[in-house]
Image (cartoon, rainbow, N blue to C red):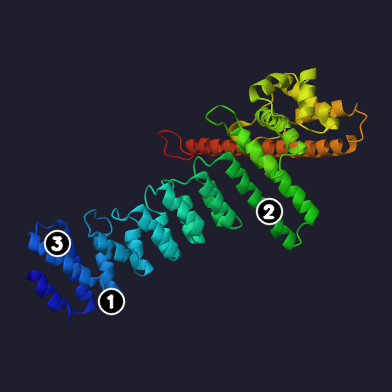
Amino acid sequence: MIVRRFLDWARTAPAGARAEGASALARAYLYSDLCEADQREAGVALTSLLDDASPVVRRALAEAFASAADAPHHCVVVLANDQSDIAALVLSRSPVLSEAELIDCAAVGDAFAQAAIAVRPNLSAPVAAALAEVGAREALIALAINESAVLPDFSLRRMLERFGSDGEMREALLARPGLPAALRAELVAATARALSAFVTACDWMSEARARRVTREASEKANIIIASETCDEAGNGPLALVSYLRESGQLTAGLVLRALLSGNRSLFEAALADLSGVGLGRVAGLVKGGRGSGFRALYLKAGLPHGLLPAFAAALAAQDELGAGTDEGGQARLSRVMIERVISACEQMNSTELGKLMALLRRFEAEAACEEARSWSAGMRGIAAVREAFDAAAGEETLQLPGSGILAA
C-alpha cells in the first residue's frame, strides 16, 4: 500500500523530491525488514523509476545501488547503460556486475564510462584486456594507474601499441610496479622516438644528431633496466636482450657500453642470446676474457671481429678493478676501464680502429662529464652542510647562557 501511494505521489512531485523519495525507497528495499509482498512491490516501483525523465532521479538510484551486493541485478544493468555520469557510479564499484557485463559496457561506453570500469578495485584480466583493446586514451591511463588491476603483459603491450606516442600514457605505464623489463625498454624506445621527432621538428638538432643522442640515451636506460632485472630462474636480462635483438637495438655499441658500465650480466645475456649457448656456460667462458673459448663464443655470437680486443680488454679491466653498477641502478661508464680499453686498442692495426676509437673517446668524454657532475654535486652538498652547521653554531653563540646579552 505504501509503495502504491509512493508511485501516485511520484507522478506529480518535482524532480528533486522524486530523487529523495527514490533514494529512501532504495534504502528501504536494501536494508529494511520488508515483508515479501512489500519487497516485491518496492522492486516494481524501483524498476519503474529507471524510466524517470529526470537524470537526478536515476542518479539517486545509482548512488544507492552502487556498492550494494543485494541491489536488484536488472536495475544495476539498466543503470550501467544509462548516460555516462550515472553509469559510472555503478560501473566503478558495483559487485553485482559480471565480467561479461563489464566487457559489454566497455565495448559500447564512452571514455568516461570506460574509465569508471578501469578504476574498479582488483579488476580482472579479461576485463582489463578488453579495455586495452577498445578503451579510449583516458580510460587506458586510468587502467595503467590502477595498481590492483590484473594487467597481462600482452594487454600492457597493446596499450603501448595504441597510445605509445602519448606522454601521459608512457608515464602511467612506467609507474606500474613489476613492469616487465622488455616492456620498460619498449617505453624507453617510444619516448626516444617522440623526443627525437620533437627536437627535429623544432630545428633544435639535425636529424642525425637527434638519432645519436636518443640512441645513446636509450642505451643508458636499457643498461639501468638490465641492472635491475632478474627473472625467477635467475637468468638475468635474457628477456630484455631478446626484445632488444628483435627490435634491432642490440648493437655492439650497446653491449660494449654495458660492459664498460660494469654490467657484465647484460653482456653475458647478449652472448647467450646471439650464440645459443647456455647462460651458465657463457659465464664460465667470459671469465677472464682471454682464452680461446671466449674468442670462439664471441665470434659465434656474430659480434664484429675487429672489436674483440676491446671487449677482451674491458673484461680484463673489470676483473682487475672490480668495476660495477653504481648504487641505485645508475649504470655509469667507468672512466678507468675506458682508459684501459683505449690503451689496448691503440696497439691494434685494424680498419675498424677509427670508428672504435671515436666511440671510445665519446664514452671517455661522457664518463668525464659524469664524474665532474658528481663531484660538483658532492661539493654543493658539503657546502650546504657547512653553511647549516655554521648557522646553527652562530645561533647558539648569539646569547650567552644566563647572561641575557648578545655575544660580541
Q: Residue 12 or 210: which is nearer the viewer?
A: 12
Image location of residue 234, percent across then percent down: 56, 27
Residue corresponding to mark 2 = 193
**Quarter of the image where the N terminus is located:** bottom left
Residue lying at the far bottom in this picture: please name it.
12
Q: Residue 319 or 23: which is nearer the viewer?
A: 23
Q: Residue 274 or 163: which is nearer the viewer?
A: 274
Q: CA distance from mark 2 to mark 1?
A: 49 Å
Answer with the quarter of the image where residue 255 lies: top right
Q: Can the viewer see residue 141 in this picture?
A: no
Image location of residue 323, percent across then percent down: 69, 25
What type is the residue that disc 2 sits on?
Arg
Instruction: Say few, some or many: other residues with alpha carbon within 10 Å of mark 3 (under 14 / 14 to 19 / 20 or more).
Output: some
State left or right for residue 3 relative to residue 209: left
What type is the residue that disc 3 sits on?
Ala
State left or right for residue 362 relative to residue 37: right
Q: Residue 12 or 274: which is nearer the viewer?
A: 274
Instruction: Say few, some or many: other residues with alpha carbon within 10 Å of mark 2 (under 14 / 14 to 19 / 20 or more).
Output: some
Residue corresponding to mark 1 = 54
Residue corresponding to mark 3 = 28
Q: Is residue 395 above or below residue 98?
A: above
Circles 3 and 2, Cβ within 8 Å, touching? The answer is no
Q: Helix, strand or loop at disc 1?
A: loop
Give the mark nearer the N terminus: 3 vs 1.
3
Q: CA distance from mark 3 to mark 2?
A: 58 Å
Q: Can the viewer see residue 68 in this picture?
A: yes
Give the mark nearer the N terminus: 2 vs 1.
1
Image location of residue 277, percent across then percent down: 69, 26
Q: Helix, strand or loop at disc 2?
A: helix
Answer with the quarter of the image where residue 200 lies: bottom right
Q: Is residue 254 above or below residue 79?
A: above
